[in-house]
Amino acid sequence: MLRKTARERRQYLHARMQQLQEAQLHEKRSALKRAIQNDSQNLRKDIRDDEKLNADLKFDESAELQDMDDEYRTLGEKEPKVLITTSRDPSTKLSQFAKEFRLLIPNSQRINRGNHVVADIAGACRSSEISDLILLHETRGKPDALVISHFPYGPTVSFTLHNVTLRHDIPNVGNVSEAYPNLIVENLSSKLGRRTSNVLKALFPASPPSTSPRVITFNNEEDYISFRNHVYVRTSGKEVELAEVGPRFDLRLYEIKLGTIEMGDADVEWRLRPYQRHKKGVMAVE
């Protein structure tokens, strides 16, 4: 079983590496075409000096690139099965947060971590055909990290948690609903943003009923993704009244790894580097 999983993983990584190389080549060809059409001299040196790229340009034909998010190619074809757990010896607040998180996601189940190691949990997820594992962490009783691992091949995406507010801390909180939610995703339009959006959307069923009274919002502002959970009631005519039912929190993307959670040697696709100079808003703008 372990050999089969390792072999399938190697085959997947090989196919993905080929896709990445094709995407990089496509990007270079597009930049070269734009420079020729606009008679522009502002061209990267590595593209300008690539003799093979310039020679092959006349044979180039525009073609649709394959979907880079190959792990989520079946998104929407079947309902996800999500497993939620915590770090070891969770505090009362983290345990309560995990319980409330279970209510957020339909078809999810929560287990107590106990003394189970991550490799055992990952093996159980594979044998039970779990689609995603969510692991919640804390520091000194304060929930501060969330890890989502997609099965069977990854990726594993880590977020930091900020401004976590549980249901009982929200004034005039409404009754919780476990109906399939309608999803609203805002300002995640860059390649990294779309990648993150797919990771989050894959946790929820793809086709909620049109009568579902529940709305979940992921709103990105300056690379912080605000999560809100509401239910709505039609009062009269076209008027709608919203009620927040919680919990609420903000997510910040920290890392994307190409393997599942137990693969310590998996390649890092993207990692936040806060002490390097880079443009703001990488989740919203290319």
Image (cartoon, helix red, strand yellow):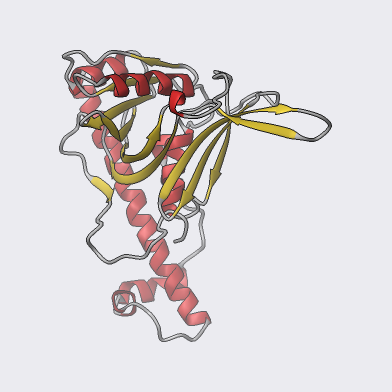
Instruction: State which quadrant residue 144 falls in.
Output: top left
- Can residue 118 be spotted in the picture? yes
Does 113 appear above or below 156?
A: above
Q: Is residue 242 left or right of residue 4?
A: right
Q: Is residue 220 left or right of residue 234?
A: left
| Front one among 141 and 207 | 141
Does 205 appear above or below 28?
A: above
Residue 123 rendering spot, x and y as whole percentages? 24, 18
Residue 221 rendering spot, x and y as whole percentages? 46, 52
| Front one among 256 and 139 | 139
Instruction: State which quadrant residue 216 falls in.
Output: top right
Q: What residue occupies the far right of the structure in this picture?
A: 237
Residue in the image at 47% along x and 56% along y: 284
Residue in the image at 35% along x and 19% along y: 96
Residue 50 rendering spot, x and y as whole percentages? 30, 75
Residue in the image at 53% along x and 29% along y: 76
Location of the N terminus (image quadrant):
top left
